Image (cartoon, helix red, strand yellow):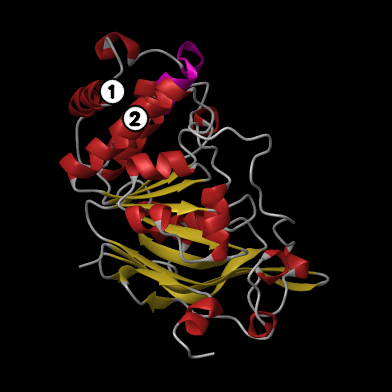
Amino acid sequence: MSLLEVKNLVVEFTGRRGTLRALDGVSFAIAPGEILGIVGESGAGKSLTGASIIGLLEPPGHIADGEVILNGQRIDNLTSDEMRSIRGRKIGAIFQDPLSSLNPLFSIGQQIIETIQAHIPMTHAQARQRAIGLLEDTGIPAAEERIDHYPHQFSGGMRQRVVIALALAAQPELIVADEPTTALDVSIQAQIIGLLKNICHEKGAAVMLITHDMGVIAETCDRVAVMYAGRIVEIGSVQQVINQPQHPYTTGLMASIPDMEIERDRLNQIDGAMPRLNAIPTGCAFNPRCSQVLKKCSQSKPELKAVQGFPQTQVACWLQDNHTGDA
């Protein structure tokens, strides 16, 4: 059974010049204890998907259609106050810049204790002990002393650990992690990745990991969804998507990762750029950049379909029909 179900999610931005569609029918599910990676170039809609689930869409952005269901409860139509009670208690959030998540005027202990007491009936002393335990669980040394320190007294990697402790404070069922390792050096990245994996295995929480780094996806995730121009173009197990990508965009992403064993003068790249919201091509949005484009690709949008021979993979690409003789 799925913990999180996102069904045909549509997010639009309405302005003086009309309405722009930023997410166009995004659907996926995450099971308890599973890590789903969301990957794609900047502007693909990854962070917007996370913000929609958390209920932190900035106006004029709004959910125009679709459903977000958490543990059987629909949450996309809740009021701000109702969503605030779910955020923290049922959904934890980890953002790219830990400084933006922490209040510089309060000690980290005050912030974690306040979060715990907002969602769980505990005395201050009990909440403080739980906060110390969370800091220890996330690898903060001398947690009993460090709990009274302020955000500026921590390094970047330690601040990110504090943010993870904050996200876990109320024992959420789902954690949405938006680029949690981007600003960190490689050794700290590995520690944060290990921490997220432990959270899944030990706490049974589901994690939605948003990143542009395929190395992080390969190390961390069970499944991966590849996004392009507000749509999921491929979703499947990490092993299948990374080793045998079925969509030309995914193939391009994989080919652009440098291979240390092969010497070359230039890195592979996907020609062109992600389209602007006011200039998304008709049909498959990737068709102007695709080297295998068919006539049909510029005429109608392909839907996600199972791939023959790859039982765990779904792809939105007309080439799949062509390969099976349907086009």
Residue found farthest to the right: 17
Give the residue displayed 66% in from the left and 74% down from the top. Answer: 293
As measured in the structure, the alpha-carbon distance from the residue carrying label 2 to the one carrying label 1 is 10 Å
Q: Residue at x 52, y 21 (%)?
A: 105
Of residue 315 and residue 150, the one placed in the foreground of this image is 315
Residue displayed at 24% across by 44% down: 200
Residue 56 appearing in the image: no
Q: Amino acid at mark 2?
A: Ile
Q: Amino acid at mark 1?
A: Leu
* Quadrant containing the C terminus in the rendered view: bottom right
Compare residues 242 and 74 and report the one nearer the observer: 242
Predominant secondary structure in magenta? helix
Of the two numbered discs 2 and 1 on the same chain, state the one appearing first in sequence.
2
| Residue 39 vertical position relative to residue 318 in the rendered view, above or below | above
Position in image of residue 143 (x %, y %): 27, 14
Q: Quadrant of residue 216?
A: top left
Q: Which residue is mark 1?
A: 135
Q: Magenta residues? A: 151-160
Per the image, is 153 magenta? yes
In percent of width and height, residue 163 lies at: 40, 31
Are the residues flagged by discs 2 and 1 in contact, CB closer than 8 Å? yes
Question: Observer-nearest residue: 156 or 36?
Answer: 36
Which residue is disc 2 drawn over? 112
SS category of the residue bearing label 1? helix
